[in-house]
Amino acid sequence: MTEAIDEWPYPTVSVDGNATVDDDGENQLCECGNDSWAEDWRHADRDGNLSFEASGSSDPAEFTVCPVCGRVYTNLSLFDARAVAAAAVAQYDVSSPLFAAALARYDRDAYGATPPAGARTSTAPTFRTRRASSHDEEA
């Protein structure tokens, strides 16, 4: 099984947590609550560098990165984790200028100069709001 590499390309913080994978393998839910359908996960090469060229890779020795919290998972652990947990092997410091620059470069490569609505292009916290419903109307 592919494990963590000796030296990560971006600053890291202490890591814990798991990702769960749907039975069909199509969606992964990170420990932080982000899932791969809500906020597209980023891909990293065998050295842990964010790289759009690794996007969609089936190489088990490459990595998948949650852009919200920075947790890093091996592709192999995600492939093998259908309906069970895949342990994070590292967690990038999302406040690091080095990580932020790599994420911005990845997003430019993936989405072009103007990312689509909903694509997260910075490491600033995102907040989800709920839609107003008829129950919210004043009496």
Image: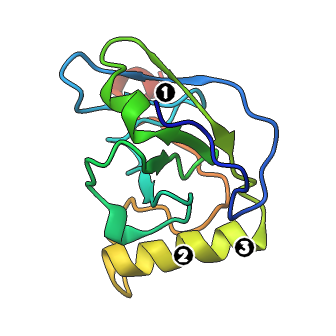
Q: Amino acid at mark 1?
A: Glu
Counting residues from the start of the chain, the first of labels 3 and 2 encountered is 3
- Considering the numbered disc 3 on the image, is that residue within a helix, a strand or a loop? helix
Residue placed under numbered mark 2 in the picture: 104
Colouring: rainbow
> Where 137 falls versus 91 (above or below)?
above
Question: In the image, which is nearer the foreground, mark 3 or mark 2?
Answer: 3
Identify the residue at horizontal 42%, vertical 46% (top origin). Answer: 61
Question: In the image, which is nearer the foreground, mark 3 or mark 1?
Answer: 3
Residue placed under numbered mark 3 in the picture: 98
User: In the image, 15: left or right of 128?
Assistant: right
Q: Amino acid at mark 3?
A: Leu
Question: In the image, which is nearer the foreground, mark 2 or mark 1?
Answer: 2
Q: Which mark is residue 138?
A: 1
Q: Nearer the viewer, residue 36 or 129?
A: 36
- Considering the numbered disc 2 on the image, is that residue within a helix, a strand or a loop? helix
Callout 2 crowding tier (Cα within 10 Å): few <14, some 14–19, many ≥20: some
Q: Residue furthest bottom?
A: 113
User: In the image, 113: left or right of 24?
Assistant: right
Image location (x, y in percent) of residue 133:
36, 29
